[in-house]
Image (tube, helix red, strand yellow):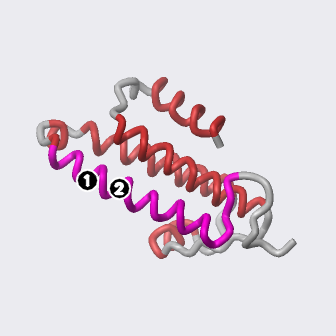
Amino acid sequence: MIRVTVAALALLSLAGCGQLRADEVAFHVLNTADMAQSINAISRDCFHEGDAFTSRILGDKPSSGEFALFGAAVSLGFHAFNRLDYVQERPKLRLAVNLLAIGAKGWQVAHNHDIGMRVSGSNPGCAP
């Protein structure tokens, strides 16, 4: 998980995103954790996408590659939002939206953990 997070943040940095704020880093770390949980469950063939928005885009049983691409798109979209002039000029709006996104993503990671999804190793939610 730590390697995946470092790799994701390194890619963002190489893409000209070297000035990440703490709230942005928090979102990207949580998004990486969500991706790792899902990809680990997908690799054990016990994954069914439960999020209505994501399942509309990827279907009920996406591949790990599809999910990784979707997760990367979410991070890039979040980053692009934070770089909009309109958002840059309104730091309170930016922080409020980012805190909502962090809360939602944090809830998602905690929920995944509660139903047995782990970032590596076996998933208690999967049949042996």
- Quadrant in which the C terminus is drawn: bottom right
Dot 1 amino acid type: Val
Report x, y in % for residue 122: 80, 60
- x, y (%) of residue 127? 82, 75
Q: Secondary structure at mark 2?
A: helix
Q: Please, is residue 18 above or below residue 33 in the view?
A: above
Task: Report the quarter where the N terminus lies.
Answer: top right
Q: Nearer the viewer, residue 70 or 4?
A: 4
- Check contact, mark 2 vs mark 1: CB within 8 A: yes
Q: Badge 2, how many Cα within 10 Å: few under 14, some, many 20+? A: some
Q: Answer above or below: position of 103 versus 87.
A: below
Residue 39 inside the magenta-drawn segment: no
Position in image of residue 101 (x %, y %):
35, 56
Is residue 44 found left or right of 83 in the rendered image? right
Q: Which mark is residue 101?
A: 2
Residue 111 horizontal/vertical position (percent): 54, 68
Query: How many numbered callouts?
Result: 2
Q: Residue at x 42, y 43 (%)?
A: 26
Secondary structure that dominates the magenta span: helix
101 lies left or right of 125: left
Q: Which mark is residue 18?
A: none
Measure how far apart labels 2 and 1 are at the Cα level: 6 Å
Q: Name the secondary structure under disc 1.
A: helix
Q: Residue at x 51, y 72 (%)?
A: 51
Which one is nearer the viewer's eye here, 28 or 26? 26
User: Going 35% across and 25% down the picture, which residue do you hit?
Assistant: 19
Magenta-colored span: 92-119
In the rendered view, would you say 70 is above or below 126? above
Q: Which residue is mark 1?
A: 97
Image quadrant of residue 39?
bottom right
Identity of the residue drawn at 58% across and 32% down: 6
Residue 97 in the magenta stretch? The answer is yes
